[in-house]
Image: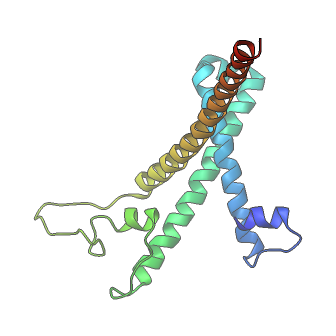
Amino acid sequence: MAAYFSTISNEKSGYHPKRVEGSVKLVQAIRKLHRGYVFFFLIPSFLRRYVPFLKTMSDDIFQTMDFINQKLNTIIKTRRKEIEDASLDEPLPHDMLTSMIIKNTFRDVNYFETGEASRFMTNSEIRVNLLDGFYSGTYKVNFFFIFLDKFYALFYKFIESSKFNINTICFT
């Protein structure tokens, strides 16, 4: 939000510019990776490896995925450190990342000793769940707006045809 505010307003947000710039790069990389999935679904691996133009596109998507993984790992590690440094009496923020990190630990509200070895989520599992959440949210919003657009187009044609039918019946 701070990056969007900085782009449309003459005022600058109160957040650190490096942090805002980093979040903008992360969101752009996620959007680029989101578009890149279609590339991998439609183009066979043989063409992606041996056609030079397609190979550069494929390598660019892989570099984007590496960038996203590094950023998300950094975010997860810093949040893990914050949770470890916090006292047990201190309440933790209620967000998805914190919930996944403290799952099956003593900080979890629903934790109970079962006698079995229950493990906490690894960084790669958390990263995959976060990316899945990003994509699911994007799809839902995108499909909602597409649905509204199609519905409006259909409804508009229905209104115009109704007006025409009413005018022809009543005023002829």
Counting from the top left corner in percent of width and height, residue 67 is at 64, 51
* For residue 113, side relative to residue 83 (left or right): left
Counting from the top left corner in percent of width and height, residue 166 is at 69, 19
Counting from the top left corner in percent of width and height, residue 154 is at 65, 24
Residue 139 vertical placement versus 18 (above, below): above
Residue 147 vertical placement versus 41 (above, below): below
Which quadrant of the structure image shows residue 8? bottom right
Q: Quadrant of the C terminus?
A: top right
Please tell me which residue is depicted at 69% across the width and 42% down the height of the picture: 32
**Direction left: furthest residue:** 115
Q: Quadrant of the N terminus?
A: bottom right
Residue 12 vertical placement versus 4 (above, below): below
Residue 58 vertical placement versus 127 (above, below): above
* For residue 71, side relative to residue 104 (left or right): right
Observer-nearest of 69 and 33: 33
* For residue 150, side relative to residue 131 (left or right): right
Please tell me which residue is depicted at 31% across the width and 62% down the height of the picture: 120
Please tell me which residue is depicted at 65% across the width and 22% down the height of the picture: 158
Observer-nearest of 162 and 97: 162
Which quadrant of the structure image shows residue 142? top right
Which quadrant of the structure image shows residue 38? top right
Number of callouts: 0
Which colour assignment does the render follow? rainbow
Counting from the top left corner in percent of width and height, residue 85 is at 43, 83
